Image (spheres, rainbow, N blue to C red):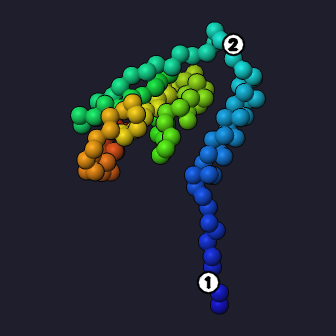
Amino acid sequence: MHPVRQPMVNRRHLLTVGVSLSLASLPAVTGGPRAATDQPALREGYANSNGVRLFLVEAGEGPLMLFLHGAPDSWQLYEGLLLEFCRDHLAVAPNLRGFSPSDQPEAVEAYAMPRLLGDVHRVHA
């Protein structure tokens, strides 16, 4: 009997391709590019979490929809999605701790999972 081999999947590549395809299809789904006057405004701000300032960009009003990036990305990965979902949601994309212009603590303990989860909870509390 031969062992079953699991396929090697590069999850980052898969996510990047998926986001690229979904962003490419947005103009077709929404009826084409919006006029400059129809473009919602992105608002920049900061959230405080356990003494760390987190930079964020948000748009819209309504139920909260968070977009969280991984390394080495930033909130800009989701700019198109913020503009799309802000029509009926408060769409928020922070730069997580350690990613400029958010604070970048030097202590390794500052990046422990409870602190990172606390950041997510405080982004729009």
Spot occupied by residue 65 in the image (x, y as percentages of width and height) = 48, 33
Spot occupied by residue 31 in the image (x, y as percentages of width and height) = 75, 23
Q: Quadrant of residue 5?
A: bottom right
In the image, farthest residue toward the front: 106
Per the rendering, the mark at residue 58 is: none
Give the residue type at disc 1. Answer: Pro
* Image side of residue 31 versus residue 103, left or right: right
**Pick the front one: 19 or 103:** 103
Residue 75 in sight here: yes
Between discs 1 and 2, the one toward the N terminus: 1
Q: In this view, does 95 lie above or below 60?
A: below
Residue 61 in sight here: no
In the image, farthest residue toward the top: 37
Spot occupied by residue 3 in the image (x, y as percentages of width and height) = 61, 83
Q: Which residue bears the numbered disc 2? A: 35
Label 1, label 2: how far apart the Cα atoms are: 57 Å
For disc 1, the neighbor class at 10 Å (few under 14, some 14 to 19, many from 20) is few
Q: Residue at x 36, y 39 (%)?
A: 97
Q: In this view, does 119 lie above or below 109?
A: above
Q: Which residue bears the numbered disc 1? A: 3
Q: What element carries label 2?
A: loop
Q: Which residue is drawn at 64% across and 68% down?
A: 7
Q: Quadrant of residue 21?
A: top right
Q: Which residue is drawn at 28% across and 51% down?
A: 108
For disc 2, the neighbor class at 10 Å (few under 14, some 14 to 19, many from 20) is few
Q: Quadrant of the N terminus?
A: bottom right
Spot occupied by residue 15 in the image (x, y as percentages of width and height) = 60, 48
Give the residue type at disc 2. Answer: Ala
Count of numbered badges drawn on the protein: 2
